[in-house]
Image (spheres, rainbow, N blue to C red):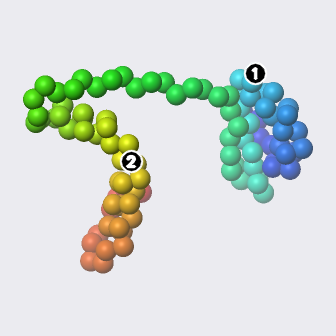
Amino acid sequence: MRELPVAEAKRDFKRVLDDAERGESTVVTRQGRPVAVIRPYEPEKARPELPKPTLPGGLLAMAGLLADWDTIDEDIAEIIASRQLEHGRPPSDFD
């Protein structure tokens, strides 16, 4: 993986994209610090379909609920952010 300063990546962007098509990744740096990676595109792999429970209850029912929860990432981020604002609560060790 090679590194390029942002000015050089902008100037030679077509070459950076051509390199990505050939499978090469490029780290774009700003003032010597990495800020982005331009890499070959890889389509997302389809996640296997989870079996739907026939009767409610149990862990399998919970997995089915989570599979249909489209905004789970945003909702969890909102819960964590609101908990961090509460006073008297020890900080989480999720970070």
Q: Position of residue 44 (x, y in %)?
A: 52, 28
- Secondary structure of the residue carrying numbered label 2: loop
Circle 1 SS class: loop
Query: Which comes sooner in the sequence, label 2 or label 1?
Result: 1
- Residue 61 percent across, percent down from the top left: 17, 34
Q: Residue flagged by tag 2: what amino acid is it?
A: Thr
Q: Residue at x 75, y 49 (%)?
A: 29
The reply to whether discs 2 and 1 touch (Cβ–Cβ < 8 Å) is no
* Near-viewer residue (14 or 51): 51
Identity of the residue drawn at 68% across and 41% down: 37
Residue toward you, 33 or 14:
14
The label nearer to you, 2 versus 1, is: 2
Q: Which mark is residue 22?
A: 1
Q: Is residue 62 above or below residue 43?
A: below
Judged left or right of residue 66, residue 16 is right
Alpha carbon separation for disc pair 2 and 1:
35 Å
From this view, report whether residue 13 is shown above or below residue 80.
above
Would you say 59 lies left or right of 39 here? Answer: left
Using a 10 Å C-alpha cutoff, classify the residue at mark 2 as few (fewer than 14 neighbours), some (14 to 19) or many (20 or more).
Answer: few
Residue located farthest toward the bottom when viewing the structure as drawn? 87
Tell me if mark 1 has few (under 14), some (14-19) or many (20+) residues whose alpha carbon lies within 10 angstroms of its own: few
Q: Residue, x 79% and y 27% (percent of image)?
A: 19
Task: Answer with the quarter of the image where residue 54 lies.
Answer: top left
Q: Residue at x 36, y 47 (%)?
A: 72
In terms of image quadrants, where is residue 1?
top right
Which residue is labeled 2 in the image? 71
Where is residue 80 shown, x and y percent of the image?
35, 61
Q: In the picture, which quadrant includes the C terminus?
A: bottom left
Q: Amino acid at mark 1?
A: Arg
Where in the figure is residue 3, as x and y percent of width and height?
77, 41
